[in-house]
Image: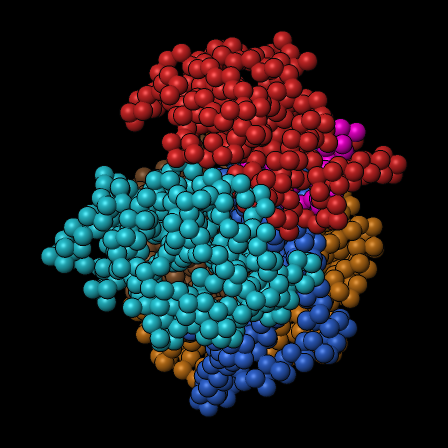
Chain colours: A blue, B red, C orange, D brown, E cyan
């Protein structure tokens, strides 16, 4: 039988999927044990117990200074920034994306500038951003918005242009005005597609959040990683990274679910 | 009413002449079937009628007035695909025309107005045989049901002209026969002029009161680009009986023999070659 | 921006995480800042930066009225950027906080020919220059690679990093490696690296109460710090370490808890020679601006009103009046 | 006429496209002039002349210390890192993406781990990377590779799965082995699609490059930006950012051209 | 040779029975046309023959041996779409079969072997009427030309069984007629058993030596899922003359009346109802 046609069944699939995770864990534990055998104070690859300790310390015990559970506090602070920024980005992308994609005049005017601007490395703009927006959450949100909204606008505009021309004609023959077409034909069809685009931008959004928190902040997941990085406290960094990965994964999952539940028509329409 | 007049219409894309010298008067209430080989400009013709494309030369008049330069509610349309809105339920797809008409700002009706529009839409859906499917999304309908829906949607705004671009091209023959009955009924019951593009000659003759064939007179490939298709025209008055058998015999030499007399005795075909140049004489 | 603000009520202070500046965070958290601000009827917002350079940039661009930095960066960034800057508090000097560390070699002379990882144009760079000078070498004898401070500790663990110059707590992290040898540090150049709180001169001139409040906050916090371990423990925590680690850093920091000591230091002649050395270093590195023709291109004024460099381009001023007021109990 | 149907002609399109660029430039010049009027030494928004000076200094005059033309040297150094990293990423993505997408066993084994790993914020892994790869170019390349390859693998695998099943069946009925199918049916069809994916990853790749250069380097565009950031030399930073944007734009253009020229069949196949 | 035997074959997806009780022997060298309404399992039937799907129950024998469980060079296939490789030129599309056969490692031939394969491919392309298009990519061919190419590609490996899934469904009627001649010639000239799925009854009767209709006996929707389609079978020996007219008459009641005697006198139809359960008696 060709390898190509060899399909593992459910049980096998699960076993196979677990394999690389187990291998990674084992490799880490070996590496860690080796380094710790050489130097019991080694910080680079802490033992699982050390990491467990750190997690317990950060997540389960209140910080004596502030009385906060640091890890939850960091998560809350980062997530609220991230979600606010993504909400703003999404809204901007929806409005401008539809305008640019639907109206040839808007497309001609703003299409090129958005295309070029989306190539600007946003991190390089940080100092200017901080001056204009101040150092509070506004600047961090602005960074994430700038870093993701331009791409999203481009994406939405392209997808509006991808709508079958027939639909727009049909709407016109039903007497729809441009505004009505935008509102009732284009907008609702863009929402589920936007979810796909937002999922792609989650990675960059986290990156910008972490970068912004690294510069000026007093809480947040990125802040904590940066703070303890100078001491090479990998026992904190590694659990935080895993936690961020998990959060990113859950957000992705939630968006996929939202797409499936809120837009039941979309799966069928996409397949067609 | 709404006679449509094509007055020496040409359509070119850059150097590529798609249609040339189209002189044509479509009487009100006619059901014109448009046939011709792929790429000869049938869709282009329809798009000009829609107002989506402008003729390069000549003009199109509807009821004596120049054609509006953009699609509007006077002219309904059904395409082969993508005619219905995938994000709306069957019911909403039919209602949306009324909503566009009555709710300028939100494009959505509420309360009493909504109930009225809904009742009307349900009635129409029943008429096209979609009762019971009101709450489904188009993707879960079969191809035939989708086209029924598209028809209901277009009819709901009561256009004076209905344009169909290979509306049944993607359907099973069995389903197609059913929907033929429906479109005839729609045409009978509404005060409509229908222009339909089709690839299927038997369909053209079964449905149309008039069959118009587009063809390109010059067949050498290097000339195809430069000279567009001209118009060959056939009016078939007794339709349903006329098509069927005899047309099937002609199938494999289609489309050049469209202009020949239909062999069946009980049909009264009115044959004319409208194209001045290059079209072959009948027989 | 703040640069030409006349009398105003709201002031912003930027500080970044470093042993000598941790008291600012503590003061903000525990209400000392508010206490003094209220006393003078003003508002002071104390903002923590994780990125030191960004805090200075923000100050230079006018988004903040005061910032914590070192004497060297004060000249090369705000002063060279045309922002007239006055030292309000001389908080501490580095006495071993900044070090040159070699891997497996224990003499500074062994640095010759090596690649040195450090934050370019920072105090570390200056320390390296002074170290090389002390053994008759110059920067041409080594290769400098700009390396972010946050990553120096992990960078040290790689085989190709053999010489680093950096500050605490990174130094402590690195010295945990058995092969790390400290070969030169700021104890050899005492008083040359100063941790300051500076403010925009114009703002200060128009709002002397702002200066007074800052000094009041600072020495109040100093008092709390010497009153037991609670404050130090909180600062340690905020710096991401523990009390032991923090005290280790304090040990190599000459903290002027007493305003009198600070005044004595800043009015000494040492500050003048240091400033000249620093300016020369910055001029060599072309950090005094493109148009600078000599190390004295940016004038530096001292508490006795004497000036190093150009008198009509004074952009950096050592000033003892506020600390003196604290020493005299006149706040 | 509906706004929707209003299509500007060529001349108008160009004029409209130029508008926002002109507006941006004007806004900058006004802002700059205002700040400079207050403080002639202001560094945040330098005048165009000052930037011109800086460009001249960095691009047209050799550096007195090293004798190098700094801007070209930086560009060369950054581009060689970036291109090497992207080449490695692309190669890895091609091999693993095809394996995961084509072979159900590989898909079951590595699909999930790649999915999860692509959510890890790569910057957080830097310290570990340094230990393994050293501080040289290898670590920088590794960062870019890790940051982009996982996404690319996922992309390629999805696109392999998107290939019409009919093609694989057809190849088997022509007697092809799994290896032959991979080599002659899947690989050549993935190449042009990979170009699309790589274009999407250009942005992140630049980001990682700049981040890596900021950490340890002695040349490169990101290095220079971070170095001069120490004294807020926006007259250098802004031209560098524009230059990076231009480079990114040109790379994007080059990839699009490559796709068109090297895979003439692709445009037709995609449209179908 | 290669008689194909279906021995009480069932196919289910979970609870959904797609095909049930398929008992069927296909003689070597026959040309079987498979018809039936959409979704009744024709493609599923073909995929089982290909080895792509396994029957849930029963077995399939080819020449007395169990069917190979994956597609191989013994069974060629042409689908409605996606049958040719879009990244290869017309010539390379035909040659690739030979390359798979002869160049295990690289899947590419060089030198003498390549020239031989190329000559063979050119010959075949000429036979299917694609001479002059050798260096084009499939996307620039018309639908009809693409299907010719797919046929040439499949034939080049000399399969013993050729499976066609609505191969001409997307083509214009005129073009379809041309390609019908071609497929008959291919079938005549090669030692082939052909199984073809089609939606077009006239095509089925024109081409097949035997026409098999699939239908679902129970039509209430809730039962459709549970019980699969059963098999109704019609063998048509005199084909070309037989189809055409008479079938067209049956069109709109298709597919149930497939099993009825064909009305034309000069056809000799051998009608049987193979399905034991639920199929209606003729008439
Ligand atoms: N926007 C356009 N720009 C350039 N050429 C076009 C454009 N639209 C159509 N054409 C050309 O005009 C010719 C006629 O196209 P049209 O779609 O009207 O043909 P058709 O008769 O509808 O064909 P089919 O039966 O395949 O639908 C084709 O050669 C096509 O390439
Ligand atoms: N992999 C699958 N999993 C579940 N159900 C399937 C699968 N493949 C096919 N089916 C179902 O089996 C039934 C028969 O499908 P099949 O494609 O064989 O029909 P068909 O006769 O070829 O239809 P058409 O004429 O539309 O091509 C359909 O109801 C389909 O939904
Ligand atoms: Mg058309
Ligand atoms: Mg099928």
Name the quadrant containing residue C4.
Answer: top right
Q: Which residues are magenta?
A: B80-102
Where's the N terminus of chain A, which quadrant?
A: bottom left
| Residue B147 placement, left or right of D190 | right
Name the quadrant containing residue D210.
Answer: bottom left
- The percent coordinates of residue B234 (x first, y second) are 49, 20
Q: Nearer the viewer, residue E150 or B68?
A: E150
Q: Nearer the viewer, residue C328 or A52?
A: A52
Residue in the picture at 59% in, 40% down: B177
Residue in the picture at 14% in, 58% down: E113
- The percent coordinates of residue D119 (x first, y second) are 54, 64
Residue in the picture at 33% in, 49% down: E183
Q: Quadrant of ligand 1?
A: top left
| Residue B86 placement, left or right of B212 | right
Q: Is residue E149 visible?
A: no
Q: Using the image, determine if residue E58 lies above or below residue A84.
A: below
Asked whether residue A182 is drawn in magenta, I would say: no
């Amino acid at each position: 039988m060709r390898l190509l046609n060899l399909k593992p069944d459910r049980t096998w699939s699960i076993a196979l999927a677990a394999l690389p995770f187990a291998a990674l864990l084992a490799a880490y534990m070996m590496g860690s044990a080796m380094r710790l055998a050489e130097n019991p104070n080694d910080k680079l690859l802490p033992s699982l117990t050390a990491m467990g300790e750190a997690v317990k310390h950060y997540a389960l015990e209140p910080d004596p200074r502030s009385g906060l559970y640091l890890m939850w506090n960091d998560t809350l602070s980062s997530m609220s920034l991230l979600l606010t920024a993504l909400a703003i980005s999404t809204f901007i992308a929806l409005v401008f994306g539809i305008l640019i994609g639907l109206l040839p005049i808007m497309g001609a005017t703003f299409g090129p500038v958005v295309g070029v601007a989306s190539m600007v490395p946003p991190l390089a703009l940080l100092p200017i951003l901080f001056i204009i927006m101040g150092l509070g959450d506004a600047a961090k949100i602005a960074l994430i918005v700038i870093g993701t909204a331009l791409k999203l606008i481009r994406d939405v505009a392209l997808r509006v242009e991808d709508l079958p021309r027939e639909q727009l004609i049909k709407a016109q023959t039903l007497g729809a005005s441009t505004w009505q077409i935008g509102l009732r034909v284009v907008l609702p069809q863009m929402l589920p597609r936007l979810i796909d685009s937002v999922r792609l931008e989650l990675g960059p959004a986290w990156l910008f959040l972490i970068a912004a928190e690294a510069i000026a902040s007093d809480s947040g997941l990125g802040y904590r990683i940066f703070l303890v990085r100078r001491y090479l406290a990998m026992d904190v960094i590694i659990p935080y990274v895993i936690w961020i990965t998990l959060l990113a994964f859950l957000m992705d999952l939630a968006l996929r679910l939202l797409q499936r539940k809120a837009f039941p028509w979309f799966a069928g329409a996409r397949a067609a | 009413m709404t006679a449509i007049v094509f007055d020496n219409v040409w359509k070119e894309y850059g150097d590529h002449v798609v249609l040339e010298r189209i002189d044509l008067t479509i009487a009100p209430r006619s059901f014109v079937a448009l046939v011709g080989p792929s790429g000869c400009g049938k869709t282009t013709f329809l798009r000009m009628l829609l107002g989506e494309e402008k003729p390069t030369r000549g003009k199109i008049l509807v009821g004596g007035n120049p054609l509006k330069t953009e699609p509007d509610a006077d002219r309904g349309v059904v395409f082969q695909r993508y005619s219905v809105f995938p994000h709306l339920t069957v019911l909403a797809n039919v209602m949306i025309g009324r909503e566009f008409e009555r709710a300028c700002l939100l494009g959505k009706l509420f309360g009493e107005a909504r109930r009225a529009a809904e009742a009307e839409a349900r009635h129409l859906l029943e008429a096209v045989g979609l009762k019971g499917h009101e709450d489904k999304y188009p993707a879960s309908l079969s191809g035939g049901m989708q086209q029924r829906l598209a028809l209901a949607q277009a009819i709901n705004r009561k256009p004076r002209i209905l344009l169909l671009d290979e509306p049944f091209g993607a359907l099973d023959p069995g389903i197609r026969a059913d929907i033929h009955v429906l479109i005839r009924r729609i045409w009978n019951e509404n005060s409509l002029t229908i222009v339909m593009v089709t690839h299927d000659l038997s369909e053209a003759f079964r449905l149309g009161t008039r069959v118009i064939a587009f063809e390109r007179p010059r067949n050498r490939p290097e000339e195809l680009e430069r000279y567009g298709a001209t118009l060959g025209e056939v009016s078939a008055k007794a339709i349903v009986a006329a098509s069927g058998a005899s047309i099937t015999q002609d199938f494999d030499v289609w489309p050049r023999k469209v202009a020949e007399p239909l062999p069946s005795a009980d049909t009264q075909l009115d044959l004319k070659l409208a194209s001045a140049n290059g079209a072959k004489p009948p027989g | 921006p703040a640069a030409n603000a006349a009398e105003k009520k709201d002031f912003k202070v930027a500080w970044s995480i470093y042993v000598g500046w941790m008291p600012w965070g503590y003061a903000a958290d525990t209400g000392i800042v508010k206490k003094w601000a209220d006393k003078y009827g003003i508002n002071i917002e104390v903002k923590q930066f994780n990125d030191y350079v960004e805090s200075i940039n923000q100050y230079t661009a006018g988004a903040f009225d005061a910032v914590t930095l070192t004497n060297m960066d004060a000249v090369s960034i705000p002063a060279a950027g045309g922002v007239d800057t006055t030292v309000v508090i001389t908080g501490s000097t580095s006495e071993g906080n900044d070090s040159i560390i070699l891997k497996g070699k224990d003499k500074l002379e062994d640095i010759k020919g090596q690649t040195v990882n450090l934050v370019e144009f920072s105090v570390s760079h200056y320390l390296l220059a002074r170290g090389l000078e002390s053994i008759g070498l110059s920067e041409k004898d080594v290769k400098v690679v700009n390396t972010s401070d946050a990553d120096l500790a992990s960078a040290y663990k790689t085989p190709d990093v053999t010489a680093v110059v950096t500050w605490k707590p990174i130094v402590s992290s690195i010295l945990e490696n058995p092969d790390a040898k400290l070969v030169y540090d700021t104890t050899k150049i005492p008083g040359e690296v100063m941790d300051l709180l500076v403010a925009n001169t114009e703002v200060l001139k128009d709002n002397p109460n702002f200066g007074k409040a800052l000094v009041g906050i600072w020495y109040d916090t100093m008092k709390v710090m010497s009153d037991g371990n609670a404050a130090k423990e909180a600062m340690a925590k905020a710096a991401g370490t523990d009390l032991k680690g923090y005290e280790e850093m304090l040990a190599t920091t000459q903290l002027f808890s007493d305003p009198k000591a600070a005044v004595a230091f800043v009015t000494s002649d040492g500050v003048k020679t240091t400033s000249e050395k620093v300016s020369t270093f910055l001029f060599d590195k072309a950090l005094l601006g493109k148009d600078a023709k000599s190390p004295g291109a940016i004038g530096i004024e001292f508490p006795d009103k004497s000036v190093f460099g150009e008198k009509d381009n004074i952009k950096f001023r050592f000033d003892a009046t506020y600390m003196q007021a604290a020493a005299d109990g006149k706040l």
